[in-house]
């Protein structure tokens, strides 16, 4: 009889717990939580320790919990768009490619964590291969450099036999075109078909003059910081800057000198990630249209490959500005 009462009491507690709504958090609280979670993912960030290995199961669970529990109704439209984008990204192959090539995760790890990190990456990449998900050549070359600098012997050995996918863009991954479309929707702040957007960009780009000296050290985040009012974000890739919201608040008289550069980069972004452009086609376009050398072009292409569609946030003001005029 006692056992029966105990069981019923436990079930009642569980039912109450399940029926309770999760505690909602503010945007600021979510940003703090995300930053704490992503301590291993920012190159310039100095950290004393890492609590979660990126894209491990505890990391994914905690990230999902943080994003799902933000009080959506209290956010600005731009914040809502960013939050929806980050939640949508969880559906795509990102989790199977656990080491983002644009950041050296290993530099923030201690010896024990490095050993665990290598096992995690190899395990995830083996799962990815079963689903035909592979890094591209630019990503693989960068990860090999990271593995060497961090003395990650297990990963160095694994990468020797790793065959990257043949093309550089997202289109070649399973659901890659859908993944890229979701990025267009967010960064461009509108649902636009890639080919329609490409035609608009090429038309606008062909009508502009350009001073090649402004492209030598082009960096999208630096352009935003120097010419726009920064809006806080949740995405570590943009150093917690909401790029679409930020580029809506720019001094267009100062930003105008980047017009041609941004439009050409946006054209190449769409070409690589949606139209299956080859590396050579992309480099030739950058060299010829921006009047730069091959080394500079390769640096710009690498950024496009590592940050798909991000440049569209900067391109949108120019296309809208053209409509007004």
Image (cartoon, rainbow, N blue to C red):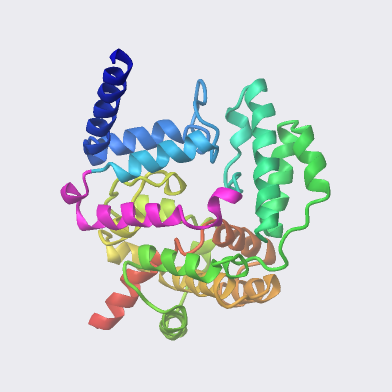
Question: In the displayed structure, would residue 27 be above or below residue 185?
Answer: above
Residue 25: tell me if it is visible: no
Name the chief secondary structure element in magenta. Answer: helix
Q: In which quarter of the image is the C terminus?
A: bottom left
Residue drawn where x is 65% and y is 62% of the image = 298
Residue 209's x, y, as percent?
Answer: 45, 79
Q: Give the range drawn in magenta.
A: 71-96
Residue nearest the viewer, comparing 9 with 141: 9
- Asked whether residue 197 is drawn in magenta, I would say no
Residue nearest the viewer, comparing 145 with 293: 145
Residue 300: tell me if it is visible: yes
What residue occupies the far front of the structure in this picture?
Answer: 1
* Residue 175 occupies quadrant: bottom right
- Total numbered circles: 0
The answer to whether 164 appears left or right of 57 in the picture is: right
What residue occupies the far top of the structure in this picture?
Answer: 2
The answer to whether 205 appears left or right of 79 in the picture is: right
Q: Quadrant of the N terminus?
A: top left
Residue 51's x, y, as percent?
Answer: 49, 26
* Residue 258 occupies quadrant: bottom left
Question: In the displayed structure, would residue 88 be above or below residue 27?
Answer: below
Residue nearest the viewer, comparing 119 with 189: 119
Residue 301's x, y, as percent?
Answer: 60, 63
Residue nearest the viewer, comparing 319 with 210: 319
What residue occupies the far left of the structure in this picture?
Answer: 74
The answer to whether 232 appears left or right of 304 in the picture is: left
Residue drawn where x is 63% and y is 69% of the image = 172
Residue drawn where x is 25% and y is 57% of the image = 78
Residue drawn where x is 35% and y is 45% of the image = 234
Residue 55's x, y, as percent?
Answer: 54, 41
- Asked whether residue 87 is drawn in magenta, I would say yes
């Amino acid at each position: 009889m006692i056992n029966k009462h105990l069981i019923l009491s436990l079930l009642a507690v569980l039912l109450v717990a399940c029926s309770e709504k999760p505690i909602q958090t503010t945007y600021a609280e979510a940003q703090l939580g995300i930053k704490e979670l992503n301590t291993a993912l920012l190159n310039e960030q100095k950290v004393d320790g890492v609590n979660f290995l990126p894209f491990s199961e505890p990391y994914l669970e905690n990230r999902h919990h943080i994003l799902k529990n933000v009080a959506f109704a209290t956010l600005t439209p731009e914040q809502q768009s960013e939050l929806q984008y980050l939640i949508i990204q969880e559906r795509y192959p990102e989790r199977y490619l656990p080491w983002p090539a644009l950041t050296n995760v290993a530099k923030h790890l201690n010896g024990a964590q490095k050993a665990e990190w290598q096992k995690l990456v190899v395990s995830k990449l083996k799962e990815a291969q079963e689903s035909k998900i592979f890094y591209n050549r630019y990503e693989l070359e960068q990860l090999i450099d990271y593995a060497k600098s961090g003395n990650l012997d297990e990963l160095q050995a694994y990468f020797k036999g790793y065959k990257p996918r043949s093309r550089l863009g997202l289109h070649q991954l399973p659901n890659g075109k859908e993944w890229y479309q979701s990025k267009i929707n967010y960064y461009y702040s509108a649902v636009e078909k890639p080919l329609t957007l490409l035609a608009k960009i090429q038309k606008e780009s062909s009508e502009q003059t350009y001073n090649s000296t402004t492209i030598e050290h082009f960096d999208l985040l630096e352009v935003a910081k120097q010419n726009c009012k920064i809006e806080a974000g949740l995405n570590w890739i943009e150093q917690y800057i909401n790029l679409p919201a930020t580029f809506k608040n720019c001094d267009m008289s100062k930003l105008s000198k980047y017009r041609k550069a941004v439009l050409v980069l946006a054209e190449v972004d769409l070409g690589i990630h949606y139209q299956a452009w080859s590396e050579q086609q992309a480099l030739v376009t950058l060299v010829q249209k921006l009047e730069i050398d091959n080394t500079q072009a390769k640096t710009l292409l690498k950024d496009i490959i590592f940050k798909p569609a991000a440049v569209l946030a900067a391109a949108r003001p120019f296309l809208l500005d053209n409509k007004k005029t």
